[in-house]
Image (spheres, rainbow, N blue to C red):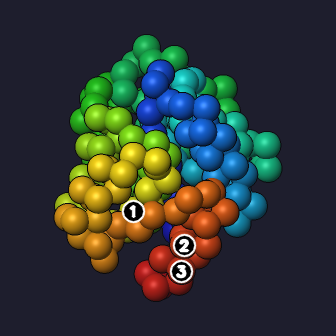
């Protein structure tokens, strides 16, 4: 039986302190649940924070890197180098059982849209009310909102229990 992979997406250089805090805690909670963290794998922003959080709890991390020379987080266990730039976003989404978006930006929005198109469940942890409203309007059955990493984890447990 395959291991459960949770994709955590979010801003790189433009991540806010709250995005980073949520991502780090989410990484910890995902690892404590025994699941694998998948991120964009770089050494910045949400990608780095979620991976570091998972590693702080001895979790396993996968990084889907955009280029051969990408600066990888040292908290990544399994790097997958795509040399596909932003096209790797589809790999991030399709390789995950569920997606959590910490914060919002153009790259994150593309991953959320790809997830909805692929009929993957998405949890948004963002203060961006326009993003919440827009993505929920696309498919309210696939997109949910969490105010904290703890709430996102509880939602993930429900999502995963219905996928079996």
Q: Is 82 on the left or on the right of 26, as rendered?
A: left
Look at 48% across and 77% down and name the residue there: 159
The crowding category of the residue bearing disc 3, from other C-alpha atoms within 10 Å (few below 14, some 14 to 19, many at least 20), is few
C-alpha span from label 2 to label 1: 10 Å
Task: Determine contact: label 3, label 2, CB under 8 Å.
Answer: yes
Dot 1 or dot 3: first in sequence order is 1
Cα separation between marks 1 and 3: 12 Å
Q: Residue at x 44, y 56 (%)?
A: 124
Q: Is disc 1 placed on a helix, strand or loop?
A: strand
Could one spot residue 22 in this view of the protein? Answer: yes
Question: Residue shown at 39%/46% (left/top)?
Answer: 128
Are discs 2 and 1 less than 8 Å apart at CB?
A: no
- Between the C-alphas of marks 3 and 2, the distance is 5 Å
Q: CB atoms at circles 1 and 3 under 8 Å apart?
A: no
Q: Is residue 76 visible?
A: no
Please rate how many residues cluster around mark 1, counting C-alpha atoms within 10 Å: few if below 14, some from 14 to 19, many from 20.
Answer: many
Rendered image: mark on residue 77:
none
Which secondary structure, mark 2?
Answer: helix
Say whether disc 2 or disc 1 marks the residue closer to the N-terminus: 1
> Local crowd at mark 2 within 10 Å, few (<14), some, or many (≥20)?
some
Indicate the secondary structure of the residue bearing disc 3: helix
Is residue 131 left or right of 123 when viewed as pictured? left
Q: Residue at x 62, y 46 (%)?
A: 22
- The percent position of residue 20, horizontal first and vertical second, equals 61, 36
Q: Is residue 137 above or below residue 55?
A: below
Q: Which mark is residue 158?
A: 3
Can you give x and y, in whole percent of width and height, for residue 106 in the image?
29, 35
Residue at image mark 2:
155
Label 1, on which residue?
Answer: 122
Q: x, y (%) of residue 40? A: 45, 36
């Amino acid at each position: 039986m395959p291991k459960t992979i949770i994709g955590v997406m979010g801003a790189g250089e433009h991540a806010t302190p709250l995005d980073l805090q949520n991502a780090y805690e989410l990484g910890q909670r995902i690892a404590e649940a025994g699941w694998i963290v998948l991120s964009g794998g770089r050494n910045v922003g949400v990608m780095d924070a979620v991976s570091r959080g998972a590693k702080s709890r001895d979790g396993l991390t996968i990084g889907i890197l955009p280029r051969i020379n990408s600066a990888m987080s040292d908290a990544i266990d399994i790097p997958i180098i795509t040399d596909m730039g932003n096209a790797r976003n589809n790999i991030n989404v399709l390789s995950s059982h569920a997606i959590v978006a910490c914060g919002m930006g153009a790259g994150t929005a593309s991953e959320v849209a790809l997830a909805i198109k692929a009929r993957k469940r998405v949890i948004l942890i963002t203060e961006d009310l326009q993003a919440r409203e827009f993505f929920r309007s696309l498919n309210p059955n696939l997109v949910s909102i969490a105010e904290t990493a703890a709430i996102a984890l509880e939602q993930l447990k429900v999502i995963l229990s219905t996928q079996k």
